Amino acid sequence: PAAIVSFGIPIVTPWRNDVKLACMTVGIPPPTVEWRLGDVKLHKQSRIDIEDDNTLVLRNLQRSQEGNYSCHVKNSIGFDEIVYSLQIQ
């Protein structure tokens, strides 16, 4: 099955900081990974990056980026997700 081996935690960080959210996965067949903010799928942008190891990188954080960031993984056998609650001060 698809599984995540990292843990979602609440994160409080200062405004304009950068933050990295890990999503380490295991599974056979290899799972697909999707990051979301609430129900909105995230894509690479000027201040959002998704690294090769599926880590979500948020740069120059703004208060509008507060919320629940979730990593969803799935393959033909199963599904898993973790959630990070991000608060910006």
Image (cartoon, rainbow, N blue to C red):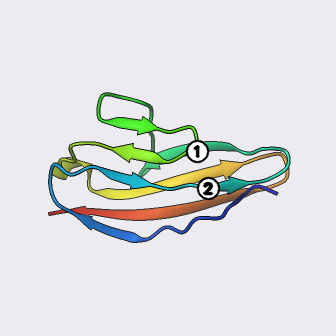
Cα–Cα gap, marks 2 and 1: 7 Å
Q: Quadrant of residue 43?
A: top left
Q: Position of residue 32 (x, y in %)?
A: 68, 41
Q: Position of residue 82 (x, y in %)?
A: 55, 63
Residue at 85% from the left image edge and 52% from the top image edge: 77
Quickly name the residue at label 2.
Answer: 24
| Residue ID at (48%, 63%) | 83
Q: Amino acid at mark 2?
A: Met
Tag 1 residue: 53
Give the answer, above or below, for where 6 lies relative to 47: below
The amino acid on which the numbered mark 1 sits, given as a three-letter code, is: Asp
Q: Are marks 2 and 1 in contact (CB under 8 Å)?
A: yes
Query: Does 32 sit left or right of 76 as displayed?
Result: left
Left/right placement of residue 31 relative to residue 61 reads right
- In which quadrant will I find the C terminus? bottom left
Q: Is residue 73 left or right of residue 12?
A: right
Mark before the other along the chain sequence, 2 or 1: 2
Between 19 and 87, the one lying in front of the other is 19
The x, y position of residue 24, in whole percent, is 61, 55
